[in-house]
Amino acid sequence: MTIKRAQRPLLNRRLDGFGTTIFAEMSALAAATGSINLGQGFPDTDGPEEVREAAVRALRDGRGNQYPPGPGVPELRQAIAAHQAAFHGLTVDPDREVLVTAGATEAIAAALLALVEPGDEVVALEPYYDSYAAGIAMAGGTRVPVTLRPDGDRFVLDLDELRAAVTGRTRLILLNTPHNPTGTVLSRAELAAIAELAVERDLLVVTDEVYEHLVFDGEHLPLAAFPGMRERTVTISSAGKTFSFTGWKVGWVTGTPELVDAVRTAKQFLTYVSAGPFQYAVAEALRLPAAYFTGLADDLRAKRDLLSAGLAEAGFRVFRPAGTYFVTTDITPLGGTDGFAFCRELPGRAGVVAVPNAVFYDDRAAGAPYVRWAFCKKLDVLAEAVSRLKNL
């Protein structure tokens, strides 16, 4: 006897609506049309040669070719702790307060799976990196967006709107600064207000700080350093953006032993461990002289200025980023209202690919006229893109 079950979609309903990412779609479009890809945020050159050679040396020496320790290799955990102390004045125990992950994306997913239960609300700044929405959904949480809105040539956070978004069901705030895609870098006053709110309402905070060294205006300040935040903040960063080895997927979590233990419990059932030899290389990268980090920001600042000026000359309204390696523009001065249509037509019109910001919004209408451009490319590539965009 055959038992027939009620038909239902194969995909877990929590992931309904999460198809192929826009980055994959636009990168495929760039490849198919031979366009300059300013959509997906990856550099078109590798990072420091000595870091790449450190990975080769680790491979040849047999370090990391088998399973590394679950929390990460000791050399990397020690380097992460030293980095937090040197750049941010944070004292971190490398043995109990550091966890190495498969990039920041896994760190975010593991933190949400560990800390959020069905019915919990998670407040996130909108527009947001697309994995945030998926991570919250997989954890069974409810996403509560607080929208960054244009003000002059930048996007700003309304602290009153943030406070109003917190309810009795709020479990945590998911914070990203420097912020992708808008390039906003939250100020000391804004972070102090967020810290005060978290302490007052007894909230956890997960901070995505992968662009911590890509700041051009202002300064990056870890929320964990603010009063009352050390014991309630999961701090996340990674090597990909800082060292231009995005394919290595080496990220990390720092926090109190209790918070790190919670995240590790979820993480161990995702990848368990990863990137063994690369962990040794990233340990060496984190110990590069301070001049490397300032040089990185200076180089990207020049690229920001080149692309921003070119986009403005082409007719876009440009929001000048204080950090990250993305520029957001408004297409309405060019007569556009639909970022999706604009980005899909752009390769044919100008031979350039960008990403529609609407994918980063719950309210697609709010993000409809905005388009994101990546400037982590060679100067001659950016100059060529600017030249092509003049045809618009």
Image (cartoon, rainbow, N blue to C red):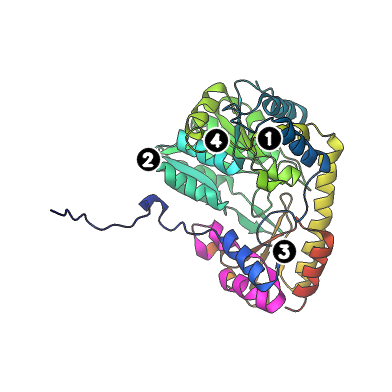
Between 268 and 300, the one lying in front of the other is 268
Residue with the mark numbered 1: 277
Residue 381: quadrant of the picture: bottom right
Q: Which residues are magenta?
A: 340-365
At label 1, counting other C-alpha atoms closer than 10 Å, the crowd grade (few under 14, some 14-19, many 20 or more) is many
Which sits earlier in the primary sequence, circle 3 or circle 1? 1
Residue 118 bears which disc, if any? Answer: 2
Q: Note whether 321 is above or below 206 in the view shown.
A: below
Left or right, 17 with respect to 374, comes to left
Residue 21 pos. (x, y %): 54, 58
The type of residue carrying mark 2 is Pro
At label 3, counting other C-alpha atoms closer than 10 Å, the crowd grade (few under 14, some 14-19, many 20 or more) is many
Classify mark 3: helix, strand or loop: strand
Name the main secondary structure of what is drawn in magenta: helix
Which sits earlier in the primary sequence, circle 3 or circle 4? 4
The type of residue carrying mark 3 is Val
Residue with the mark numbered 4: 205
Residue 142 visible from this viewpoint: no
Residue at x 84% of width, y 64% of height: 380
